[in-house]
Image: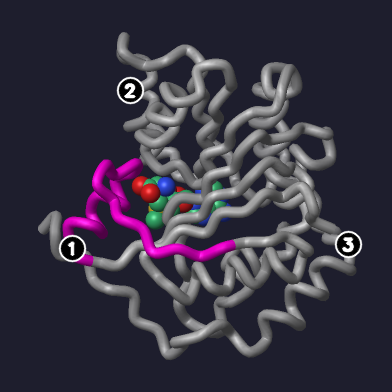
Amino acid sequence: MFANSRRIESTQSSPHPRLNEIVRKHLTEPYRRRPSAAGRAAVAAVADRLALAPFILDAGCGTGASTVALAHAFPGRWVLGVDKSAVRLATGLRLIDGSAAPANALLLHCELVDFWQLAAAAGLRCERQFLLYPNPWPKPEYLKRRWHAHPVLPALLAVGGSIELRTNWQVYAEEFAEGLRLSGVVACVQRMEAENPLTPFERKYAASGHALWRVEAPLSNAR
Ligand SMILES: C[S@@+](CC[C@H](N)C(=O)[O-])C[C@H]1O[C@@H](n2cnc3c(N)ncnc32)[C@H](O)[C@@H]1O
């Protein structure tokens, strides 16, 4: 079961033809969505700690295994894992409550759209953002659900830092990099090896023989 993840199937084999138009629209038109009350409460619970210094964001952290690993790697920073799945986070919280968990790891049950909107509005700033294996939404009609074509993109960029995305779908990596370039950010796409998998999904995809892709970029020039 473990090493037999299905490859992503899509009628798209290259970046979506409407990517440019949609990203430019998001960059120029304000996003008027109001964050939810639950999102406000969740962000308020951690905002004081995150305001102390730029923090590390593990966006869509799942069980938080990568949040714990990143907290070990960046001992001088708060490392915040955010996910909307209470079930996955419950696994992570058991890990965090364990004696070996670093004290700088935080897990937050929150919709990422709320998180980025509220963090940007509050002036919170990241040192690094990790988007590790986001849901690919491979049907072309779901383009706007992919983070680079989502109206929350300007808020994600405003939170800043450097960004690292990993995915097992090359089209997602290429589109994400192109979305960043359209935002004024130099981004590179690389094929990567997962000798020491950082996340459960990375481990599963690597064991299933999938090609893995990484996009890295500093967000300092984003407009
Ligand atoms: C494919 S899993 C990857 C989990 C983890 N990063 C890993 O690599 O093992 C995608 C994760 O993103 C979370 N997610 C997707 N959309 C989200 C959103 N809008 N807000 C918060 N979490 C979201 C899902 O709940 C899920 O845990």
Image location of residue 158, percent across then percent down: 78, 47
Residue 200 included in the magenta stretch of the image = yes
**Residue 60 in the image: x percent, y percent?**
49, 46
* Spot occupied by residue 47 in the image (x, y as percentages of width and height): 72, 24
Highlighted magenta segment, given as a residue range: 188-209
Find numbered disc 2 in the image and state the secondary structure of the residue it sits on.
helix
Q: Amino acid at mark 1?
A: Ser
Callout 1: few (<14), some (14-19), or many (20+) C-alpha neighbours within 10 Å? some
Let me know if residue 123 is in the magenta part.
no
Question: What amino acid type should be assigned to the residue bearing mark 2?
Answer: Arg
Numbered mark located on residue 94 in the image: 2
- Rendered position, 68 above or below 86: above
Element under label 1?
A: loop
Q: Which residue is mark 1?
A: 208
Q: Which mark is residue 30?
A: 3
Sequence-first disc among 3 and 1: 3
Please report the residue visible at 37 percent of the width from the left and 16 percent of the height from the top: 101
Using a 10 Å C-alpha cutoff, classify the residue at mark 3 as few (fewer than 14 neighbours), some (14 to 19) or many (20 or more).
Answer: few
Task: Measure the C-alpha gap from mark 1 to mark 2.
Answer: 27 Å
Residue at the far left: name it. 1
Q: Is mark 3 within 8 Å of ligand 1?
A: no
Crowd band around label 2 with a 10 angstrom C-alpha radius: few (<14), some (14–19), many (20+): few
Q: Residue at x 68, y 17 (%)?
A: 49
- Say which label, 2 or 3, has the lower sequence index: 3
